[in-house]
Image (cartoon, rainbow, N blue to C red):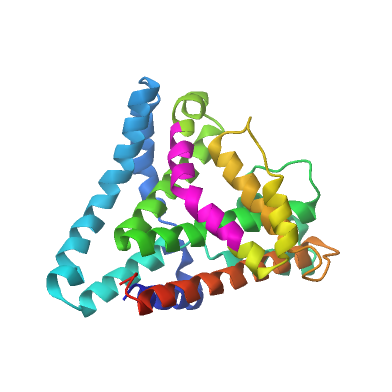
């Protein structure tokens, strides 16, 4: 049933591009802001507790429906399949990564550099380094894939709709805090580290499985060597996750895909590797379903 929900969820994601604004779930922003107002006034341990509570409260309705409709309680259920499909659809994103890459490339091809820069800014979540634009867009794609796709799939397979929704709520919480922290010092110093740590913990396994997928989908030796040389002891956990998956993904494209001469081709190559990795993941989920390991 999980495999069917994932397949239909990805299909619905690609054909419902006109409804993308619904999946951005911006109506939760006021809820997050309410929690942040209290979290930034208290000690850091209490701030961590408030952040966790924000995620748990939004996850409770899905927990309730999961156990009311679960096949363990009612047997095979069309209602549960539709419920799981809806949760997967809402959890993927908040925007379709492939469509966003297409928008970025179309903007470059049409000479609309301002629009292309805006999309790249959103993809990289404002964390632009001194690297070239080619490296920046490749890294952004490889970092966003676990945030938008692989993290959702991993937690959905592990915990069902509850896991997928919990991961998405945490990511929405992180994105909102990162946006607001640009103009709120207290939020940036007292609350954002707690949110980033929780998100990094949820992503620790998916990031490494995604990196393995990148290696298997591209140049394994180059990706493996990059992984072995990855050492960021002075970086917080969320940055170590990002650097690992970005560097391994970029190394996996070495000598495997056409060497990009511009950021448009670089974005398409990176997305192609992500798609191949997702295909490998879906095969594994299908095998797990076949042997009864993922119901």
Q: Position of residue 219 (x, y in %)?
A: 73, 65
* 114 in the magenta segment: no
Figure quadrant of the N terminus: bottom left
Q: 279 or 170: nearer the eye?
A: 279
Classified by dominant secondary structure, the portion drawn in magenta counts as: helix
Residue 120 relative to residue 80: left or right? right
Q: Considering only vertical position in the picture, is 48 above or below 146?
A: above
Residue at horizontal 50%, vertical 36%?
180
Q: Which residues are magenta?
A: 194-212
267 left or right of 154 in image:
right
Residue 124 in sight from this viewpoint: no
Image height of 120 relative to 71, above or below: above
Which residue is depicted at the point 59% across and 60% down? 212
Q: Residue at x 23, y 80 (%)?
A: 78
Q: Tell me how many marks there are.
A: 0
Q: Residue furthest right?
A: 261
Drawn side of residue 90 relative to residue 20, left or right: left
Q: Horizontal placement of 143 versus 160: left or right? A: right
Where in the figure is residue 241, as x and y percent of width and height? 57, 45
On the image, the x and y values in percent for residue 10 come to 46, 73
From the image, which quarter does the C terminus lie in? bottom left
Residue 249's spot in the image, x, y percent?
A: 68, 58
Question: Is residue 197 one of those drawn in magenta?
Answer: yes
Could you say which is closer to the camera, residue 277 or residue 29? 277
Q: Is residue 173 visible?
A: yes
Q: Is residue 221 above or below residue 275?
A: above
Choose between 28 and 196: the one closer to the eye.
196
Tell me where residue 3 sits by quadrant: bottom left
Identify which residue is drawn at 22% across, 63% down.
66
């Amino acid at each position: 049933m999980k495999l069917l929900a994932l397949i239909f969820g990805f299909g619905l994601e690609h054909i419902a591009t006109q409804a993308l604004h619904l999946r951005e779930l911006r109506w939760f922003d006021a809820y997050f802001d309410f929690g942040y107002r209290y979290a930034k006034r208290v000690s850091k341990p209490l701030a961590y507790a408030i952040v966790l509570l924000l995620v748990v409260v939004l996850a409770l309705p899905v927990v309730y429906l999961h156990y009311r409709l679960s096949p363990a309680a009612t047997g095979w259920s069309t209602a549960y399949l539709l419920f799981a499909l809806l949760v997967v659809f809402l959890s993927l994103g908040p925007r379709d990564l492939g469509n966003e890459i297409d928008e970025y490339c179309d903007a470059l091809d049409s000479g609309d550099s301002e629009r292309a820069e805006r999309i790249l800014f959103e993809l990289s979540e404002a964390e632009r380094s001194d690297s070239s634009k080619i490296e920046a867009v490749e890294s952004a794609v490889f970092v966003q894939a676990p945030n938008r796709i692989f993290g959702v799939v991993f937690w959905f397979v592990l915990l069902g709709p509850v896991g997928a929704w919990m991961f998405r709520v945490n990511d929405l919480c992180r994105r909102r805090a990162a946006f607001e922290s640009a103009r709120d010092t207290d939020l940036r110093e007292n609350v954002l580290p707690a949110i980033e740590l929780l998100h990094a913990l949820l992503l620790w396994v998916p990031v490494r499985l995604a990196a393995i997928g990148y290696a298997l989908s591209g140049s394994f030796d180059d990706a493996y060597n990059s992984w072995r040389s990855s050492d960021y002891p002075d970086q917080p956990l969320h940055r170590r996750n990002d650097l690992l998956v970005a560097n391994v993904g970029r190394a996996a494209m070495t000598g495997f895909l056409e060497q990009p001469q511009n950021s448009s081709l670089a974005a398409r190559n990176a997305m192609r590797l992500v798609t191949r990795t997702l295909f490998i993941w879906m095969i594994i989920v299908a095998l797990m379903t076949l042997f009864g390991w993922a119901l």
